Amino acid sequence: MRTLLFTLAMMFSVVAFAQQEVQPQYEVEGDMVKATYFHENGQIAQTGYYLNGKLQGVWKAYDRDGKKIAMGNYEQGEKVGKWFFWEASTLNEVSYDNSRIATVTQWNNANPVVINQE
């Protein structure tokens, strides 16, 4: 009986540990707060900044393997300027005006383009 209880307790511990979420990290940098969100596997899902509780500056998104899938800018919580979305061999360039899509340009291997992916 003691062995059965020990085995059940160990199984419960392993399952409970495996289901823990990776908590977001927040760091104060000057007037802004840097946020880092994670996938369940521990890889970074998103990074960016908040200013006065609103999204601000460059935000980047990554897939579960750590590959960048999106990058763009926010001003006072609104999407602005050019955003880039990577999908397989295609790069979608989306221009925003007042948080609304103004234009979309799709790039593929036939139209090579170089983007700094820092």
Image: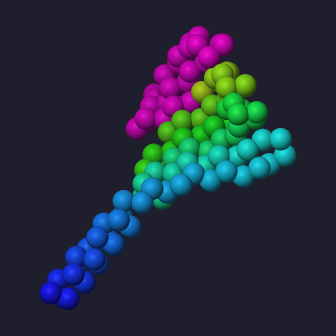
Does residue 29 lie above or below 94 as drawn? below
| Residue at image location 66% in from the left, 41% down from the top | 48
Given residues 52 and 8, the one toward you in this image is 8
Q: Is residue 15 left or right of residue 59?
A: left
Regarding residue 113, the answer to whether it shows in the image is: no
Q: How is the image coloured?
A: rainbow
Q: Residue 58, percent across and down?
A: 68, 36
Q: Residue 11, percent across and down?
A: 26, 74
Q: Residue 45, percent across and down?
A: 51, 47
In the image, residue 100 lies in the stretch drawn in magenta? yes
**Taken as a whole, is the magenta stretch helix, strand or loop?**
strand
Q: Outermost residue, front direction?
A: 1
Q: Outermost residue, top direction?
A: 102
Does residue 108 lie above or below 67 as drawn? above
The number of callouts visible is 0
Q: Outermost residue, bottom direction?
A: 2
* Screen quadrant of the N terminus: bottom left
Q: Which residues are magenta?
A: 84-113
Given residues 59 and 33, the one toward you in this image is 33
Regarding residue 60, the answer to whether it shows in the image is: yes
In the image, residue 111 lies in the stretch drawn in magenta? yes
Q: Residue 88, percent across and down?
A: 40, 38
| Residue at image location 70% in from the left, 40% down from the top | 49
Does residue 35 lie above or below 79 as drawn? below
| Residue at image location 80% in from the left, 48% down from the top | 29
Q: Is residue 107 left or right of residue 4?
A: right
Q: Outermost residue, right direction?
A: 30
Which of the 4 quarters of the picture holds residue 83?
top right
Q: Is residue 8 left or right of residue 90?
A: left
Does residue 24 lie above or below 54 as drawn? below
